[in-house]
Amino acid sequence: MKGTTPETRWTEQFPALGTGPIPIEPYISAEYFELERDRIYRRVWLYAGRREEEIPNPGDYFVQDIAVCAASVLVARGQDGVIRAFHNVCQHRGSKLVWGAQGTTRAFMCKFHGWTYADDGRLMRVPDEDQFFDFRKSEHALPKVAVDTWNGFIFINLQEQPEHTLTEYLGELGHLVSGYDFSSKALTYGYETEAKCNWKVWRDSIIEGYHAPFLHAKSMAKLINRGNNENPFAHLLSFRAYGPHCVLSVPGNAAVKPSPVGALAMKLAPGMTRTPPRSEKDLANLPGFLNPSRNPNWSFDIIFIFPNFQFHLWSSGYYLAYSYWPTAVDRTLAELRAYFPRPKNAAERFVQEYSKRTNRDVILEDLSTLEHIQSVLKSGGIKNMLLQDQEVAVRHASKAVNDYVCSPGRPARSALAK
């Protein structure tokens, strides 16, 4: 079994991507940002930031604010067990109906005038109702938002009539990612921050590994490549494109020498902190879509779902879910949520806390760098970005955005073609 990096030029396998520079104008232009709002975020399916098991009981709900579309979406599980989504706005005077991020209730009451709605959106009670004119409660239910689930992840679409179903939107990728038991992992921790950068600057930083040996030299670099003479720059083990979505396989470093705390974590819970190489048995038991080259020095796969959601499936058995929401042309709300197997003992719980600290450090390293990038993009000192082959996912995602923005008359589904 070979453990070396495939000598592959990924970009050349997708001629439509080209190999030229990428303009920075989409990262700084307010006009381009408005087009992204109208032609992407108001049209496509968006991950709502939660999984089904996070609202397991009738009456459970959460709110997802989508600043780029000036929208607030209320997602609730009804008394019949069905998950529904609504615009989070009272139909009386436009007050925001639910102010909290999440909770459980049998009904939603507006704090302004007490209008009360059932968890299926029906208007149930209007104080002093007989003072209204020609009024029928049945005509003033909460406006519905399209909602669907995929592998337990909840998605919404802000179009009144979505141009395509979630299944159609995900296309081949939706069928590919199977055989992975997402529901056996529980939400363990999360981070949220507002970064002073364009949402694509944030996106680009976590769909390529070229920066890891340098920016993350003190945090995670050793886990994937630093000190690995066979693959010193973390060349990808695989890159696959599925319409605007893509999947990347990231290498690991079999020669890693962990810190004293890291070594303790590996000793306490080896199954949750295992580093490459993977055994023949481990590789054979992987779901087919993960690490398709079956390289033993594999660390994790990145599954990117256009435009702003991705999750990292780690070889050690947990996954990270990332969302990055535009709030302005130079502002992004970034969310990270980590899902681990439920700990069976204190040792496994310790390992989860160790992961929490490591991911915190990685985010802080990214955050400061990305804000510095945005601060100088308008200077005129750079007009284009030069991308190398290992940044193929950045090139692919940039083209997907441009396809939507620059082809307004084309049905969105046509952008899904390979």
Image: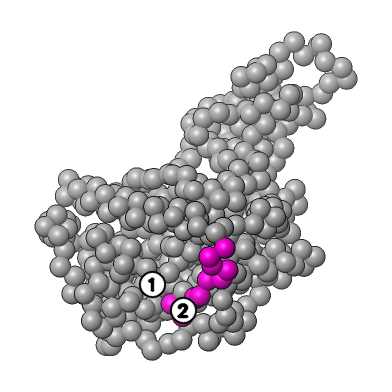
Q: Residue at x 55, y 59 (%)?
A: 379
Disc 2/disc 1 C-alpha distance (Å): 9 Å
Which residue, given by chain and number where applicable, does mark 1 sit on?
Answer: 210
Q: Residue at x 75, y 10 (%)?
A: 128
Q: State which quadrant residue 293 falls in.
A: bottom left
Label 2: state its secondary structure: loop
Placement of 92 over or under 314, stated as above or below: above
Label pair 2/1, CB-CB below 8 angstroms: yes
Residue 388 drawn in magenta = yes
Placement of 383 over or under 35, stated as above or below: below
* Type of amino acid under label 1: Tyr
Residue 263 drawn in magenta = no
Q: Residue at x 73, y 31 (%)?
A: 141
Q: Residue at x 56, y 41 (%)?
A: 64
- Position of residue 28 measured from the top left corner of the image (x, y, whole percent): 60, 57
The answer to whether one can see residue 69 in this image is yes
Which residue, given by chain and number where applicable, does mark 2 sit on?
Answer: 388
* Type of amino acid under label 2: Gln
**Can you tell which mark lies on residue 254?**
none
Q: State which quadrant residue 299 falls in.
A: bottom left
Nearer-the-camera pick, 184 or 417: 417
- Residue 192 is left or right of residue 176, and the answer is left
Q: Main secondary structure of the magenta part?
A: loop
- Residue 362 is left or right of residue 138, and the answer is left
Pointer 1 local density, CA inside 10 Å: few below 14, some 14–19, many at least 20:
some
Q: Quadrant of the C terminus?
A: bottom right
- Position of residue 60 measured from the top left corner of the image (x, y, whole percent): 51, 35
Placement of 343 over or under 5, stated as above or below: above
Magenta-highlighted residues: 380-390
